[in-house]
Amino acid sequence: MSSGSRGGRAALAAVAALLGAGVGVLATAVHRSATDAAGISWHWGIVLSVVASVAVSVGVATAGAGRAPVVAYGCGWSAAVLVLLGGRAEGDYLVAGDGLGWSFLVVSSLAVVAATLGGAAVAGHGPSRS
């Protein structure tokens, strides 16, 4: 493996980590979004946050760049969400301690971990492995 390909993979991993952090921030921001139609509240934000988090992770895994970008995406997502869990300066939190907040944390986190581990396994068997 040449140093140029290592540099390229490191750059891809850095971009994947930033992408993961961005998706994590956006997922945290929209997880409480809901629409109220005829008195029925449908929380599309939780669905969107899980689908986006997993879809991007799967996209990174199938891009053929190897394991490092896949793992970097998962780490970037996790780091962003963990930082946001610390609360805001005003004393309130972006993720509430209610059912919706816990659903977001558990479902999204497990989905990203599963997609990252699965993607790393798939990426490790791909043609770009050297």
Image (spheres, helix red, strand yellow):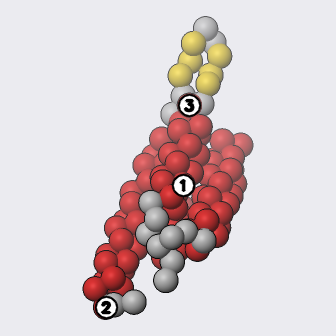
**What residue appears at the point 44 percent right and 53 percent down from the top-left corner?**
23
Evaluate whether residue 116 shows in this view: no
First along the sequence among labels 2 and 1: 2
| Label 3 crowd bin: few (<14), some (14–19), many (20+), radius 10 Å | some
Quarter of the image holding residue 126? Answer: bottom right
Residue 99 percent coordinates (x, y): 71, 43
- Count of all numbered marks drawn on residues in the image: 3
**Front position in the image: 96 or 102:** 102
- Check disc 2 and report the residue beneath it: 3
For marks 3 and 1 on the same chain, the one whose residue lies earlier in the sequence: 3
Task: Measure the C-alpha gap from mark 2 to mark 1.
Answer: 27 Å
Report helix, strand or loop for mark 1: helix
Nearer to me, 53 or 79: 53
- Residue placed most toward the observer, 2 or 15: 2
* Label 3 sits on residue: 44
Residue drawn at 59 percent across, 37 percent down: 47
Q: Type of residue at label 1?
A: Val
Q: Is residue 113 left or right of residue 48?
A: right
Amino acid type of the residue that numbered disc 2 sits on in the rendered structure:
Ser
Q: Is residue 47 left or right of residue 22?
A: right
Q: CA distance from mark 3 to mark 1?
A: 21 Å
Say which quarter of the image contains residue 98. Answer: top right
In the rendered image, which residue does mark 1 sit on? 58
